[in-house]
Image (spheres, rainbow, N blue to C red):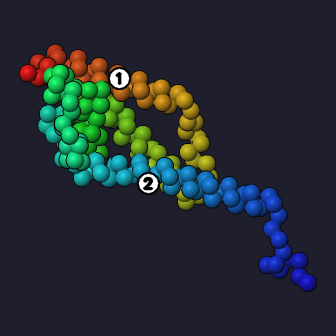
């Protein structure tokens, strides 16, 4: 019998490697698809000139903070910011919500890394060193962006809305 025949059982190390590569590719797909979907969706949206309200195009209701309190919520302007960012209008995007610019860049980087990992099976996403600090950084970024939106809006007389 030929030792190279296809009936020869594969070594456990080869099975572990192939299942590891499959899992790596699956993780790449799981990250790339939603990030790319967000970016493609943002391209289809028409950013509102007010700097907020673009999410209404997605069927979401108007922000209750603005309608009840006259001030934006922490994420007001984020959808508009992302829609402006994908169009390269970074200044307008920053004014709408600075974290939307960061979110757009992050989604683009994760899309590329996820696709690379999907295609090659190599750990491209692991090189980004995800950890708990990403969550903390995102929350801090949203809150800092909200502070920016409030400060600029109050200084310009945009907030509160009567």
Residue 71, percent from left and from top:
19, 22
Viewer-nearest residue: 161 or 119: 161
- Looking at the rendering, which quadrant does residue 65 occupy? top left
Q: Which residue is mark 2?
A: 33
Residue at the right extreme, as displayed? 1
Task: Give the image quarter of residue 53.
Answer: top left
- Residue 52 in the figure: left or right of residue 7: left
Dividing the picture into quadrants, the one containing residue 139 is top left
The label on residue 143 is: 1
Report helix, strand or loop for mark 2: helix
**Residue 12 pos. (x, y %):** 81, 60
Residue at horizontal 24%, vertical 52%?
Answer: 44
Q: Nearer the viewer, residue 71 or 46?
A: 71
Residue 25 seen: yes
Residue at figure coordinates x 17%, y 21% from the top left: 69
Quadrant placement of the N terminus: bottom right
Whether residue 53 sits left or right of residue 118 in the image: it is left
Image coordinates for residue 141, horizontal then vertical, percent: 39, 26
Name the image quarter holding the C terminus.
Answer: top left
Q: Is residue 117 left or right of residue 85?
A: right
Closer to the chain start, of discs 2 and 1, is 2
Compared with residue 113, is residue 77 higher up or lower down, i.e. above or below?
above
Residue 69: numbered disc: none
The residue lying furthest to the bottom in this view is 1
Q: Label 1: state its secondary structure.
A: helix
* Residue 51 horizontal/vertical position (percent): 18, 33
In space, the residues marked 2 and 1 are separated at their CA atoms by 27 Å
Residue in the image at 48% along x and 30% along y:
135
């Amino acid at each position: 019998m030929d030792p190279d025949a296809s009936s020869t059982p594969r070594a456990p190390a080869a099975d572990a490697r192939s299942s590891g590569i499959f899992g790596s590719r699956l993780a790449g797909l799981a990250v790339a698809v939603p990030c790319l979907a967000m970016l493609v969706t943002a391209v289809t949206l028409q950013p509102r000139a007010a700097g907020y309200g673009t999410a209404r195009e997605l069927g979401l209701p108007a922000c209750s903070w603005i309608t009840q309190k006259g001030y934006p919520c922490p994420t007001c302007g984020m959808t508009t910011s992302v829609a402006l960012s994908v169009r390269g209008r970074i200044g307008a995007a920053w004014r709408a919500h600075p974290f939307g610019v960061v979110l757009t860049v992050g989604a683009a980087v994760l899309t590329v890394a996820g696709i690379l990992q999907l295609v090659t099976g190599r750990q491209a996403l692991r090189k980004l060193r995800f950890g708990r600090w990403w969550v903390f950084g995102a929350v801090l970024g949203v809150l800092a962006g909200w502070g920016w939106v409030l400060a600029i809006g109050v200084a310009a007389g945009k907030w509160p809305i009567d």
